[in-house]
Amino acid sequence: MRSVVIVGGGPAGLMAAEVISARGVKVDVYDSMPSVGRKFLMAGKGGLNITHSDPFEVFVARYGKRQQQIEPLLKKFGARELREWVHGFGIETFIGTSGRVFPVGMKASPLLRAWLKRLNDSSVTFHLRHQLTRIRPDRSLQFQTPNGEVIVNADAIVLALGGGSWRRLGSDGAWVDWLKQAEVEVEPLSPSNCGFDVKWSPHFREKFDGHPVKSVVLSFGEFRQQGEFIITKEGVEGGLIYSASAMLRDEIYASGKAVMLLDLKPDRALEWLKEKLSRPRGKRSLASYLEKSLGIFGVKAGLLREFVSKDDFVNAERLAALIKALPVPLVAPRPLDEAISTAGGVTFESLDENLMLRNLPGVFCAGEMLDWEAPTGGYLLTACFSSGYAAGHGVIKYLSEK
């Protein structure tokens, strides 16, 4: 009987296991952790954002420079197919106000439990606490386990090893070195959907750590989006920052820093601010005037104090301009392990159209270990499911031709 080994028990690996086992092929799933789907469960902790309701042409554009490679995968198993798949477990989905799609009940655990039951019923076998250490020259797999080293052979292999973020949940990126040794092209792993370091003054850091900055517009190059983010001791993080993180990160890598512009009063025009700031304020302090007349206080006022010179603070025209476009220099992305997701990985050029490694026939790759990235909002999970689905069908095709 033909057998397939899948390494990695996240959404990509489990989807490949479902596709392959449904064809009557023996499937063994290996994972380094004591249980599977740990990052999937963590991602759903605040509500499982399974996918997004964007029209297809908008949805696929979220994958940036890898849109061309991701698009064929999404056409076979995209947002619509993923929702139907969730419904197949008797779990309904709904579209939130932001267009994001969630399962009713919001939790990841009921879906994962139902999924694992389906896989067990399909005779998928799970091997936990098995850390893959390398692919040997004969294409056998070498695992380190609590009971020592184990060597495993199979007719085909799916690697779904994740990226390099959230190491404690099993994605440590250790596979990069031994895939490179097998002459597989791998782009360096880097943080995606990440926060950034800012050189705050000690006073600002202590006073505003953990404070949300709400209803601002972030601009960087062609990017412009309204939202909110959070001040941290190290810098900034949160949804609005994550949305621009790929461009900000690339600029830092290219030039050593990136300067984002913040519109602290997006609901007011520049001329309105100039007129307000030009009025006599009497005995009121500038801080009091900013709060009473412009509604700028707290962390927003702190940001102005942090980055506006004393001379500009007393110049109505300059201060108005800075309120509409406050430059905040970012000096470095936060470490990879803190990032929500990973950029870089196995390049699509080293894979065929079925996601099989050209240098290692019979070995397929799926999920976040591939060289793509996307913003949060359901796009990350969808591409993981989609690539697992594609790799599973690639395995079936490979075995039939073999």
Image (cartoon, rainbow, N blue to C red):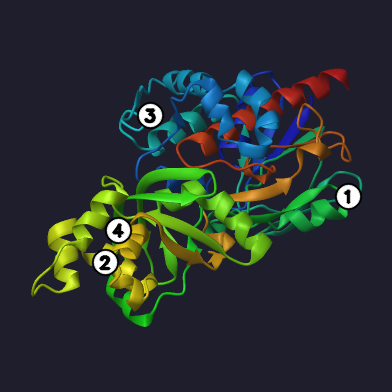
Displayed quadrant of residue 369: top right
Could you tell me how far apart the alpha carbons at marks 4 and 1 are, in whole angstroms?
46 Å
> Does residue 352 appear left or right of residue 293 in this picture?
right
The 10 Å Cα crowd at callout 1, few under 14, some 14 to 19, many 20 or more, is: few
Could you tell me how far apart the alpha carbons at marks 2 and 1 are, in whole angstroms?
53 Å
Residue topped by disc 1: 183
> Does residue 135 appear left or right of residue 167 in this picture?
right
Eye-nearest disc, 2 or 4: 2
Residue topped by disc 2: 301
Residue 352 lies, with reference to residue 291, above or below; the image says above
| Percent x, y of residue 210 | 31, 65
The 10 Å Cα crowd at callout 2, few under 14, some 14 to 19, many 20 or more, is: some
Could you tell me how far apart the alpha carbons at marks 2 and 3 are, in whole angstroms?
32 Å
Residue topped by disc 3: 99
| Percent x, y of residue 39 | 50, 47
Specify the amino acid type for callout 2: Ala
Question: Would you say the residues marked 1 and 3 are in contact, meaning their CB atoms lie under 8 Å apart?
Answer: no
Displayed quadrant of residue 9: top right
- Please tell me whether mark 3 sits on a helix, a strand or a loop: loop
The first of marks 1 and 3 along the sequence is 3
The first of marks 2 and 1 along the sequence is 1
Specify the amino acid type for callout 4: Pro
Count of numbered circles on the image: 4
